Image: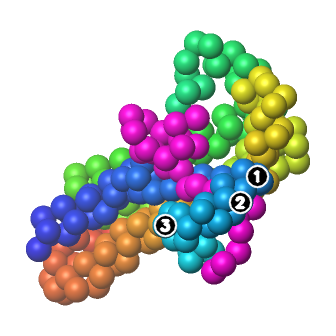
Amino acid sequence: MKYVYKTVAALLALAVIAVIICTPMISITIESLIPGALVAVGAYLDSDKAAEILEQTKGEIPTGFGEDISILNIISPTDNSIAAVIRSFGSEESSSTAMEALEPVFPAAIGFAVVLALIVICSIAAAVTAFACKNNRIPIYISIVGCGLNFMLFKTFEDVAKPFTDGTITLSSLVGSDWMMLVGDITEVSMPTTMWLIAAVFVCVIVWTLLYNATLPANEKLARKRMLGEIDE
């Protein structure tokens, strides 16, 4: 049973990294008249795709579009459109313009990245200590820290999102072309609630460890306390 606990606890802790990579981390909404115009024309021409979109929106003409983006979306060679735009910022012709436009968000983005890195470190540390340490209270303490960092992650993201929503950073400034104003602009940048799965996974590590400790036989609990020096021989 001990090794079952250690294995499950370590896998749960490492699942935090999977959540960070695969779960949508950013939700972007762009307000634009173009999608609505295309749907309206498509509906007039009896387009099946337009009818499908109108069915999803309950007959309302869309005024924009939005997407949830994960780290996996950004690094994937083929994926959703906004993620493809983010990947394009790495190209030589667009990177300088984008980097210049993104300067106001750099300090907040660095803080966000640091908190995210600390969460990853907590995940790895909790997995290692759960599997290798005799004192399984250590992964509990680390997981509590991880939960706290998850709250900080949402707080730091607010500072990252602010320049996009207050007009400091626009689509036009990102691509270096004023005509993008005709396409639309960013109206919302938020972190999906699914990112709370990070805290949920850390809580699972805590609960799993507490349940394991609670179900230990009395003689094993006594032996553990002696091993940890909590009682005299």
Q: Quadrant of residue 82?
A: top right
> Is residue 44 among the parts visible in the rendering?
yes
Chain-order first, disc 3 or disc 2: 2
- Percent coordinates x, y for residue 212 in the rendering: 25, 78
Q: Quadrant of the N terminus?
A: bottom left
Question: In the image, is residue 181 above or below residue 229?
Answer: above
Element assignment for label 3: helix
**Residue 72: image location, x then y, percent:** 42, 44
Query: What amino acid is at disc 3?
Result: Asp
User: Helix or strand or loop: what does disc 2 sit on?
Assistant: helix
Structural crowding at the residue carrying mark 1, measured as other residues with C-alpha within 10 Å and reported as few (<14), some (14–19) or many (≥20): some
Q: Which residue is mark 2?
A: 36
* Neighbour tally class for label 2: few under 14, some 14-19, many 20 plus, Cα within 10 Å: some
- Whether residue 118 appears in this view of the structure is no
Mark 1 vs mark 3: give the one in front.
Answer: 3
The image quarter containing residue 38 is bottom right
Q: Nearer the viewer, residue 191 or 46?
A: 46
Q: Position of residue 68 (x, y in %)?
A: 56, 56
Give the residue pinned by disc 3: 48
Nearer-N-terminus badge (1/3)? 1
Q: Which residue is mark 1?
A: 32
Q: Nearer the viewer, residue 123 or 166?
A: 166
Disc 3 residue crowd, few under 14, some 14–19, many 20+, Cα 10 Å: few
Look at 37% across and 77% down and name the residue there: 207
Residues shaded magenta: 58-86
**Real-space Cα distance between discs 3 and 2?**
15 Å
